[in-house]
Amino acid sequence: MQPDNLISLKDDMVAFIAGHGMRRFNGYVTEEVPTVIFEEENPDGWKDFVEHAKAAGAPFVTMSEVVLEKADIAILLDQLRDQTFPGDHSSELDDAEYLVNYVGKVGYLQLGFAHQGVMFVFEIATDWYDRFQDLIETVSDLGGIVVDDHDSDSDD
């Protein structure tokens, strides 16, 4: 089980990377880049990842974090309310409102390094961050639904 805030883990990662004589580069590796996701069941698997980066001769490791902002929750709530029928209260709204408890916390960390034209990536997220992403995806999916409100019984 992951903690609700990954800030301590981030601090450990920063120290571990520096301890291996490597530099950190603030950057996020997108899905458009050829990527290999590092899969490890061990909670300290990220250490193995950093050691692999060093063994591969990577001069630096990319690092990205996501801190939940109050504005993120506000936008999500507005979009959910816009897509919910009046008088209808969805579990998605409840979940989004509950996320306010995590404002200011680190919910996602990504490490990466390049080797032979491929980015190797390690990712870790909290449960609440995964739920936040699910809600964002739900809003995006609902936003793509086209409603035909043309009345077929009307006279043209």
Image (cartoon, rainbow, N blue to C red):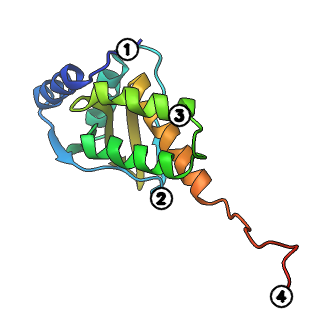
Q: Check disc 4 and report its element: helix, strand or loop.
A: loop
Q: Nearer the viewer, mark 1 or mark 4?
A: 4
Spot the residue most to the front. 155
Q: CA distance from mark 1 to mark 3?
A: 30 Å
Q: Check disc 2 and report its element: helix, strand or loop.
A: loop
Counting residues from the N terminus, which is met first, the one under dot 1 or under dot 4?
1
Give the residue number, with chain letter if any, for mark 4.
Answer: 156
Give the residue number, with chain letter if any, for mark 2.
Answer: 32
Give the residue number, with chain letter if any, for mark 3.
Answer: 92
Q: CA distance from mark 3 to mark 4?
A: 40 Å
Along the line of sight, the residue nearer the viewer: 35 or 92: 92
Q: Residue at x 25, y 40 (%)?
A: 70
Counting residues from the N terminus, which is met first, the one under dot 4 or under dot 2?
2
- Measured as percent of width and height from the top left, residue 49 is found at 34, 29
Marks 2 & 1, CB-CB < 8 Å contact: no
Q: CA distance from mark 4 to mark 2?
A: 48 Å
Q: Residue at x 56, y 51 (%)?
A: 83
Counting residues from the N terminus, which is met first, the one under dot 3 or under dot 2?
2
Q: Check disc 3 and report its element: helix, strand or loop.
A: helix
Q: Check disc 1 and report its element: helix, strand or loop.
A: loop
Q: Which mark is residue 43?
A: 1
Q: Is residue 38 left or right of residue 109?
A: right
Q: CA distance from mark 1 to mark 4?
A: 65 Å
Q: Quadrant of residue 120?
A: top left
Badge 2 amino acid: Glu
Q: Is residue 114 visible?
A: yes
Badge 4 amino acid: Asp
Badge 3 crowding class, 10 Å Cα cut-off, few under 14, some 14 to 19, many 20 or more, is many
Badge 4 crowding class, 10 Å Cα cut-off, few under 14, some 14 to 19, many 20 or more, is few
